[in-house]
Image (cartoon, helix red, strand yellow):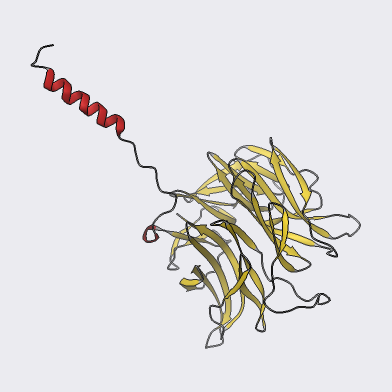
Amino acid sequence: MNNHYTPFLLALALLLLLASCQHDDPEPRFKPEDQRTFLFLTPMGEIFDINGKLVTQLPKCQYACGIISDKSDYFVSGISQKERVGYWKNGKWNTLHVDFVDDVDHWIDGIGKWDYYLYLLDYPNVLKNSGIFPLEDSGNFLPAKQGLAVSEGKCYVVGSKKTDTSGGNYLPTLYTEHKGKYTYEMLPIGEDATLGECTCVYAYDATHTVIGGSINGRPAIWVDKQLQMLPLSEPVSEEDESYAIGSVILAIESNGGFYAVGTEPYHGNDAVVTIWNNGSISHLEFDPDHTISSDVAGLIGYGDDIYIATVEYSFNENNEFTTTTVLWKNGVVVKAFAGVQTCGFTIV
């Protein structure tokens, strides 16, 4: 070999070696706190930032019901002004399916995403991109507002199903997808219970779920289909049928445990946001002197942090009725802004 080319060839070989060893760092699953962007959705298709500033009004929106994110993208499910079912991706409308009769009363609820597929619950069907997958024997089924979850390509739908068409009780029901077919099973409610409902489902892999709901008006979760009754803050007799949770129970898996949030009567208030965390119980009271009722709009586990969005209904010092959206992080208020009644939030 000509020594004149030796340094050049060595340099080229070293460059190729370095190039082969370099890999793009994968995008972290959870952003640092100072890089997290929060988006809050209203049923009218308004999206607000964490300061209560209007970011966008979704075009052609008749009704919006759910918001999720995938890295830097956000997706909102809903119905367009032309009665089409679909979603907005970063504010741009996409019709998910057009083969519906125009006068059908669509019941859009859950939204989920896996890889390139987006899932919507348009009762009595699950829509997956351009496919329609009916829920088996769904005539007496009532889907939950946050009743769809997807993980590793497996889709779950929850709600309540009437067991007797002549007027029987509704029971908690889980639909599970297998090869494109959605079959259901009733979840256990325990002895002496007569009715129950599922209000949300969280799937953290292809085989494990946490489902929130209630049994005879008492808060409950099902971990991998096994019932766990949640404790009450104040004693209620078994004969007292006036007790009822005031809003949905949302539940997730977090750091090997289970975290649920809903509302319950507390200190004379009919609906106070309540947290159940592996047996412990606590409350989120934003403004006890003025709040008359609270609701839960969303629950997100993000790394080691738990975020909850609530809606607070109150009368201010001038006796004016106000609606306030509050974002909580690990039980502490992050931000509150009045005049917005959010129905969900996400982190991008």
Query: As rendered, which of 322 and 148 lies closer to the eye?
Result: 148
Query: As rendered, which of 176 and 190 lies closer to the eye?
Result: 190
Rendering coords of residue 206 (x, y %): 62, 43
The quadrant of the image that shows the N terminus is: top left
Quarter where residue 55 is shown: bottom left
Rendering coords of residue 44 (x, y %): 57, 61
The quadrant of the image that shows the C terminus is: bottom left
Quarter where residue 162 is shown: bottom right
Rendering coords of residue 260 (x, y %): 62, 64
Left or right: 27 as drawn, with respect to 327 = left
Residue 315's place in the image compared with 98, above or below, is: below
Residue 7's place in the image compared with 223, above or below, is: above
Regarding residue 147, the answer to whether it shows in the image is: no
In the rendered image, the residue lying farthest to the left is: 4
Quarter where residue 312 is shown: bottom right
Query: As rendered, which of 94 and 139 lies closer to the eye?
Result: 139
Regarding residue 256, the answer to whether it shows in the image is: yes
Left or right: 289 as drawn, with respect to 72 = right
